[in-house]
Image (cartoon, grey):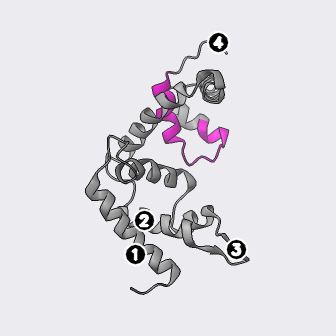
Amino acid sequence: MGDVNVSLETYAGLCALMADTGGDLEKEFVIAGSEGVGREDWTAAKEYYTARMQDPADMGKTAMAFMPLFQAAQARMRGGGEPGSLEMFAKVHAEMTNRKDPNDPTKKLDHMIVIAENGFTHAKWLEMEGYWTPRVGSDEFPEYDPELAMKFRELLQKETDRVLGIVR
């Protein structure tokens, strides 16, 4: 792995733009080209940064540097707003946790089915999780908002009751 001509920040921005390409290299090349990055440079950057993020010797440093850059690029793409409502986040979470597989009620319904039924691609759901989890998940995150967290817990309980058919 030698030098790469694409900065981590540029790579993260390209990854955000490519979130829904499904790994289609031709689509990736078109997007990279529209941002001034040629095929060879994109391929080299993708191989380089993927290898760095998977290398145990890197100890997650590259991935930890990548995520805030990637999330900032996603925020710029959506104009800084929420990727979806807190209500929708709670609804999908409740369904992912509590819906059962109709073919085997001892198992949870595949989360990819829940995501798709609620109008998300996997990439868009990950964006939603990346946005809301630090805000409502734990005070370990600097973005944590106790009022939003309380609202989320109330919404999650309401949605869980709906999924389970509980009337309170």
The kind of residue on which mark 3 rests is: Thr
Residue 13 is covered by the magenta coloring: yes
**Few, some or many residues within 10 Å of mark 3 (<14, 14–19, 20+):** few
Callout 4: helix, strand or loop?
Answer: loop
* Cα distance in 3D space between marks 1 and 3: 23 Å
Mark 3 or mark 4, whichever is nearer to me: 3
* Cα distance in 3D space between marks 2 and 1: 9 Å
User: Is residue 81 found left or right of 44 in the rendered image?
Assistant: left
**Few, some or many residues within 10 Å of mark 1 (<14, 14–19, 20+):** some
Tell whether label 4 touches label 3 (CB within 8 Å).
no
**Quarter of the image with the N terminus in it:** top right
The kind of residue on which mark 1 rests is: Lys
Q: Which residues are magenta?
A: 7-28
- Residue receiving disc 3: 106
Residue 18 horizontal/vertical position (percent): 54, 42
Q: Reading the chain from its start, which is encountered first: label 2 or label 4?
A: 4
- Residue receiving disc 4: 2
Callout 3: helix, strand or loop?
Answer: strand
Q: Which residue is at the front of the view, 9 or 109?
A: 109
**Few, some or many residues within 10 Å of mark 2 (<14, 14–19, 20+):** many
Question: Tag on residue 158?
Answer: 1
**Quarter of the image with the C terminus in it:** bottom left
